[in-house]
């Protein structure tokens, strides 16, 4: 039985996994920081302007949009590697193709997971900030 951890997944996913991992870290840091901030606002019965929250929500929305695209880029590079290996091999074996498919599937799944996390986090933070923050009156 193979033990799978984040580092092993990163190695199997190839080079495209590193920007995806960076997006995951950014998503988690921003979500936790804004969540703590909103919790402290709620606990202290204070107010914050919505304009202070919106940049973080915009970043999370951007990550939710680009993470799947970067994941699909990993799919394309994985397929290129798979077909290159087939072209260079004297005889075609399933193991040759499987390594490229591994890379393709891991990056796609990871990109989609990051997008889901960023979307849910953005929604929760936006809902909480709507209840706790003041909006600009024009």
Image (cartoon, rainbow, N blue to C red):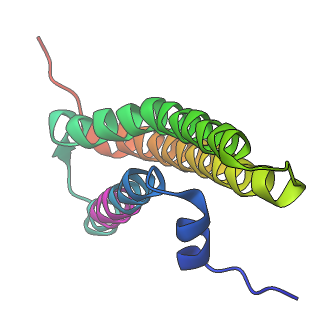
Q: Is residue 36 magenta?
A: yes
39 or 117, nearer to the observer: 117
**Residue at the far front in the pictured view:** 90
15 or 56, nearer to the observer: 15
Q: Looking at the image, which residue is at 75% across and 87% down? A: 3
Location of residue 36 (image quadrant): bottom left
123 or 83, nearer to the observer: 83
Q: Is residue 10 magenta?
A: no
Location of residue 40 (image quadrant): bottom left
- Left or right of residue 31: residue 137: left
Main SS, magenta region, reads helix
Judge whether 108 appears above or below 23 on screen: above
Judge whether 17 appears above or below 74 on screen: below
Q: Looking at the image, which residue is at 58% across and 58% down? A: 13
Q: Quadrant of the N terminus?
A: bottom right
Tell me residue 109's x, y (percent): 67, 48
Tell me residue 130's x, y (percent): 38, 36
Q: Looking at the image, which residue is at 57% across and 75% down? A: 6
- Left or right of residue 38: residue 72: right
Q: Quadrant of the C terminus?
A: top left
Magenta range is: 28-39
Tell me residue 69's x, y (percent): 50, 30
Q: Looking at the image, which residue is at 27% across and 62% down? A: 37
């Amino acid at each position: 039985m193979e033990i799978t951890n984040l580092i092993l997944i990163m190695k199997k996913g190839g080079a495209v996994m590193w920007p995806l991992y960076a997006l995951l870290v950014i998503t988690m840091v921003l979500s936790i920081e804004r969540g703590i901030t909103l919790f402290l606002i709620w606990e202290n019965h204070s107010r914050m302007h919505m304009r202070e929250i919106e940049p973080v929500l915009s970043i999370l929305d951007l990550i939710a949009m680009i993470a799947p695209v970067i994941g699909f880029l990993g799919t394309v590079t994985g397929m290129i590697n798979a077909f290159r290996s087939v072209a260079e091999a004297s005889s075609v074996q399933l193991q040759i193709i499987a390594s490229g498919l591994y890379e393709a599937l891991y990056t796609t799944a990871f990109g989609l997971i990051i997008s889901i996390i960023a979307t849910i986090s953005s929604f929760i933070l936006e809902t909480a900030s709507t209840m706790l923050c003041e909006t600009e009156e024009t």
